[in-house]
Image: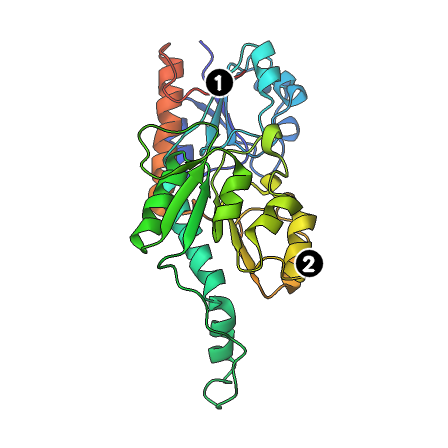
Amino acid sequence: MLKGVLTYPRFPKRLQAMIADRYELLDPGKQTPGEAFSAEQRAKVVALVTIGGRPVTGAFMDELPNLKLIACYGTGYDGVDRAAAKARGIAVCNSPGANAAAVADQAIALMLAVMRDVPRADAYVRSGAWGAGERSNIHAAFGLKGRKIGVYGMGAIGQKIASRAASFEADVQYFSRRKLEDVAYPHHATLESLADWCDVLQIAVRAGDDNRHIINADILRRLGPHGYVINISRGLVIDEPALIEALQHRAIAGAGLDVFENEPRIRPEFLTLPNVVLSPHQAGHTIEAHEDMQDRVMANLDAFFAGKPVPFEVPLD
């Protein structure tokens, strides 16, 4: 049986070593698989390990004629053309929940940073202005106690964001497509209703074509001039021109963004806005999260090569 596993792009040394120890690792390094390997070598590949947001098209799958499994590193799998995978008999899996705590931590960090104006406060101290007695332009802000935190998407990450926000004595409610019986927080029937209610909208929904740019000018208007939006999901969920306009005209108070629609090439307007805090898609970037994701990738690969059901398979419909 072929045991070729292609990793694209490159992954942490720990995962690369585990794959190489059990299977035939094909690592193209900084090249594309087509540049690094011959057609004969690519024919050895039966499993692909990739990042969920990276495009895996039908044409890419056709370059790997014996591909039978696409294993996504992390929760997301939005970059995979699932219809193309289904048509070719290729299973798709991910590593859900492994980085949920880390991502939730970052969501709270971004919320605190933008609400309390942490970057500008840091710059004020570092510049020497505080020590020189210069007046600060940092104004008193609302704290989290009593704030209304709306969570859009109540999966593993959303639930951890909710529990963390609640520990700050905030009021938490959520919107998802269906009301979850095992979640105690109040459920809103629509995203519009949640936006009308909340002071901070935390986006933790899985991104897809059905919610592309769902955070639009109307949702931002509903948040209002004292409202904040935090996104640790995927950049495509937000209509970025609408968000930039809302931030520029103070239609909302601020935003905390870890993800962007065309990252790493983000819209330059974000760089000049004082009421937005930016981070480079690093929410899940902790040692513990990476090790847990790697272990889930290996669990998927090991089950697949043993002829057993893949533990974290995702639907292709």
Answer with left or right where residue 35 lies relative to residue 190. Answer: right
Q: Nearer the viewer, residue 8 or 174?
A: 174
Query: Where does the N terminus fall, quadrant-wise?
Result: top left
Can you say whether 165 is above or below 46 in the image?
Answer: below
Q: Residue 269 has which mark?
A: 2
Look at the image and tell me whether residue 231 can be seen: no
Q: Amino acid at mark 1?
A: Pro
Q: At which x and y percent is residue 94?
A: 44, 27
Say which quarter of the image contains residue 33: top right
Can you say whether 181 is above or below 270 in the image?
Answer: above
Q: At which x and y percent is residue 21?
A: 36, 27
Please say which color scheme the image uses: rainbow
Answer with left or right where residue 298 lies relative to residue 140. Answer: left
Callout 2: SS: helix
Can you say whether 88 is above or below 117 in the image?
Answer: above
Can you say whether 263 is above or below 190 in the image?
Answer: below
Say which quarter of the image contains residue 302: top left
Q: Amino acid at mark 2?
A: Glu
Q: Residue at x 50, y 74 (%)?
A: 139
Q: At which x and y percent is residue 34?
A: 65, 26
First along the sequence among labels 2 and 1 = 2
Find disc 1 in the rendering and name its residue: 315
Q: Residue at x 32, y 45 (%)?
A: 163
Q: Nearer the viewer, residue 37 or 94?
A: 94
Q: Contact, CB < 8 Å: mark 2 with mark 1?
A: no
Q: Residue 58 has which mark?
A: none
Q: Nearer the viewer, residue 152 or 187?
A: 187
Q: At which x and y percent is residue 169?
A: 31, 55
- For this orientation, the residue located farthest to the bottom is 132
Q: CA distance from mark 2 to mark 1?
A: 37 Å
Q: Residue at x 67, y 61 (%)?
A: 248
Are there few (<14), some (14-19), or many (20+) residues within 10 Å of tag 2?
few
